[in-house]
Image (cartoon, grey):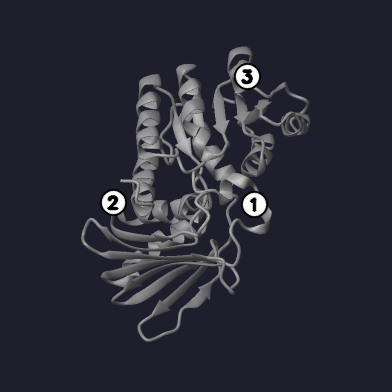
Amino acid sequence: MNQKKWNVGVIGAGVMGERMMNAMRTHEKFRVAAVSDVSAERAQEAAKLSEDVPWYTDYKLLLEKEELDVIYLAVPPKFHHAIALDVLAHKKHLLCEKPLANSLAEAEEMLAAAKEAGVIHAMNFPLYYQAIFPQLRSRLEELGTIRRIDILTHFHQWPRPWQQTPWLSGREQGGFIREVLPHFTHLTYALFGDVEVVRSEVEYPADPAACETGVSAYLRLADGTPVTINGLAGIGHQEHLDYRIYGTEGTLSVVNWANLFVGGNGDAPVPVEIAPFDRLSLLLDELATAIDGGEARLVTFETGVKVQKVLEALLGHE
C-alpha cells in the first residue's frame, strides 16, 4: 500500500478550517505543509501548530512556491471561485468548504475547471460522514411510502455566538440559508436524489446589507414527494434543527445534527443510541483513497453544483 503522506496547502485559517487542520495534523495520509490567510497572525499561528511550516498572506505565493498535492479551501464563499480557479490552474487536488461558491454560475465554472484539470475535487459535508447517515439510509425501508420531508432550522441568534464574523451576518454571502441549509439539501440529495424548489419566501430585516431572518419554502423530490423548509432567526427559542422524514409506517428525525429519533405507527419518536464516527478522519480516509486512485465516497463538485442550484432558488436568485 502507498504510504506516502500527501502535502496539503491550507488557504483560509479561520474558524471554518481549524477542525479540519487538526484532523489533518493527526492523519496518517496527510500533512499540513503550508498555510495562507489574509491575517498574518492567523496564518502564523496555524503554521506554528503544523510544525512551523511556511505561511503566507497571499495564497498565490503559496501555490507558486510550495510543493503541494492538495489544497484545502476554507475561506468565505465569496472568495471560493477566484481562488479555486487559480488552484485548479495549478492542477492541485481540491477539498472545498460548502457552499461551493457564491452563485450558480461560479459553481458551474468551478466544476468545469476541476474536470479540465483532471484532479480530485471534493467538499466537506459533515453529515455525510457521521454515524447517523448510514443509520438513516438503512432505516428508510421501515418507513413505508415517504409522504413528506420537513426541514426546520430555528436560531435564537444569527450568527451564533461562536460565529461572530461579519460575512456570516451579511446578505452578500452570509445567512443561515447559505451556511446551514446546504447540509440538509445535500442530505436530501444523498438519501433521495434530485430536489427542486417550487416556491420560496425569504424574510429580510430593514438593513439592506443584513442577511435573512426567515425562510418558508416548498420543494419537491423527483417523484413528487414534498419537502418543506421552515427557517427563522432572532426568535425567543434556543437553537433547534430538525430534519424529519414522514412515511406511512414510521418517522425518522435528525435533531441538532447528531441525534436520531425513530417512531413507528402511533408511537412517539424515541432516541436511538449511535456510536459516533470520527467524521473528519473518515472524510480524509476517502480523500486519500481517491488520490491514491481508488474508488472513494466523496461529495464532488457535481453535487456541489446541485446544492448551489437549490440555495440560489431559495434565495430567489434564479
Mark 3 vs mark 2: which is more N-terminal? 3
Residue 128: % across, % down:
47, 51
Residue on which the image places disc 3: 62
Residues under labels 1 and 3: Cα distance? 27 Å
Point out the residue furthest to the bottom here.
Answer: 266
Indicate the secondary structure of the residue bearing disc 1.
helix
Q: Nearer the viewer, residue 92 or 181?
A: 181
Dot 2: few (<14), some (14–19), or many (≥20) neighbours within 10 Å? some
Mark 1 vs mark 3: which is more N-terminal? 3
Residues under labels 3 and 2: Cα distance? 38 Å
Residue on which the image places disc 1: 163
Residue 164: % across, % down:
66, 51
Q: Is residue 316 above or below residue 216?
A: above
Q: Is residue 8 above or below residue 267?
A: above
Q: How many marks?
A: 3
In the image, what residue occupies the spot 47% across and 18% down? 91
Q: Quadrant of residue 226 in the image?
A: bottom left
Quick check: 77 left or right of 28? left
Q: Amino acid at mark 2?
A: Asp
Dot 1: few (<14), some (14–19), or many (≥20) neighbours within 10 Å? few
